[in-house]
Amino acid sequence: MARAAMRGEGPVLAGLAGSLIRPERDNLVERPWGGDGIRRFKRIPADAGPARRFGEAFEISAFDADPEAGRYPSRVRLGDGSIVGLPGLLEAHGEVLLGEAWLRRHGACFPLLPKTLSVKELLSVQGHPAGHTEVYIIIDAEPGATLRLGFSRDLEAAELERDLVGGIARQDELTHALGSSIDAGALQSVLAPWFADRTAGDAALSPWLERSVTSRARRATVLDLAGELKALYWRVLDSMNAIEVRPGQVIYNATPKRLLSGSGALASAEVHALGNPEGREILALEIRRPGPTFRAWDNVRFPKRAVDVGATIAALNLCATRPEEFMRERVPVPGRGGAFVSVDCEFFRVEHLRPARGRPVAVPGGGPHSLHCLAGTVAVIGDGGRALGRLEQGESALVPVGVGDYRVEVADAAEAAAPADVVRVTLPER
């Protein structure tokens, strides 16, 4: 069927154009900050051997112009078990699956990059270019979990750049002082919890240092450099808002409108470092456009990853923000029971569909869009009762242009008592 789909054979292509296109749900990516929440959420069995740290699942990835999306393209399993790449499928049959108007605006691609994130450790301090905002829908979070978002006070670009560049230099000096015999992974396992514990002093590192560094003078140098880096680690974190997260929250990471008023500038994602020093895991659906991520500071991670301090600072708003400016409520959509909207901006619209037993949620036809099932199992039913497909927790789908009006309902009586939660993401048609 994969070859027939790519050739555009009538029955196969018609079937794809008139139903949900469901990518494989295991498009997982290992990250050093990842946890095990994605596997649990998607009900993917663990591999034998050492636990793997999956930080991201690319839900719908069909935008080859973006290096990250191109590296992890979505795959679609057809009825006979054969696999077809979603980017190639859209490129070959964009007019049928996406429509002419979409092709004129966006090309033969899906210009969003929704991901499920499992964040167990701190991510880097980062930002994105103008026009690239992000939504985080919190699926689950350990009690007390936080993330850093937006500066909590006004900062000067030159001072921030001097601090971060100096910190990176100190990290290099620390690595040199320890010598080449120290494994970077082992070093991370020792220093990361020490940095994260604000109260831990030099004594907590002394036993490890005495085993690893024979020279007393070098041990003193290492302790001095580590102390400097720890102070900067917390100074950077404390310069950002610490937002406590809980399941069900919707957080829109975008420059507050009050800071853009009259400027004509596009909103961008504010500075952020997802995760927290305490290692309290967060599971979230992230909605954003494909595009570059600028990394300014990596919280003294070993081995050191590439950063671009200047480019990141140039992309950031350095004015103070408040946590409440990023929080969004679900507002009922008039005339569509069970449908709510949380974010409706110039880049995308995020709806939340909450069907219940005997109460399906109506969805109007329109352009291609994505669906993401966060809880329960739902059936998607088209005009005349035609079944378009099912979505289980942890699955996503691309809805082609030709599907038309449909409804989302709880899948069957056995699961009717369980809550269902589906996120629908559309792009502006203007």
Image (cartoon, rainbow, N blue to C red):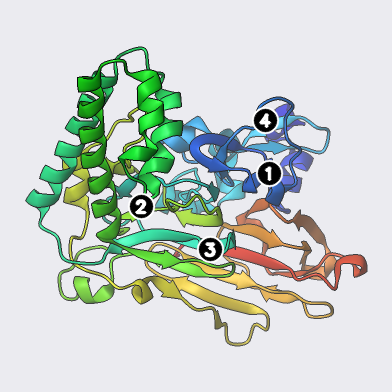
Q: In percent of the image, x 53 and y 63: which residue is there?
A: 137
Residue 292, image quadrant: top left
**Please, what is the three-letter code of the amino acid marked with disc 4?**
Arg
Q: CA distance from mark 1 to mark 4?
A: 35 Å
Q: In percent of the image, x 25 and y 33: which residue is there?
A: 223
**Please, what is the three-letter code of the amino acid marked with disc 2?**
Thr
Q: Which mark is residue 39?
A: 1
Please name which of the two marks, 1 or 4, marks the residue nearer to the observer: 1
Which of marks 3 and 2 precedes in the sequence?
3
Q: Which mark is residue 199?
A: 2
Which of marks 4 and 3 precedes in the sequence?
4
Q: Picture coordinates of residue 319 (x, y %)?
A: 18, 66
Provide the residue designation for mark 3: 137
**Please, what is the three-letter code of the amino acid marked with disc 1?**
Arg
Q: Picture coordinates of residue 111 (x, y %)?
A: 45, 49
Mark 2 residue crowding within 10 angstroms, few (<14) / some (14–19) / many (20+):
few
**Please, what is the three-letter code of the amino acid marked with disc 3?**
Ile
Q: Is residue 134 visible?
A: no
Mark 4 residue crowding within 10 angstroms, few (<14) / some (14–19) / many (20+):
some
* Label 2 SS: loop
Q: CA distance from mark 3 to mark 4?
A: 38 Å
Provide the residue designation for mark 4: 7
Q: CA distance from mark 2 to mark 1?
A: 33 Å
Please name which of the two marks, 3 or 4, marks the residue nearer to the observer: 3
Q: In percent of the image, x 69 and y 75: which residue is there?
A: 362
- In the visual, does 346 lie left or right of 296? right
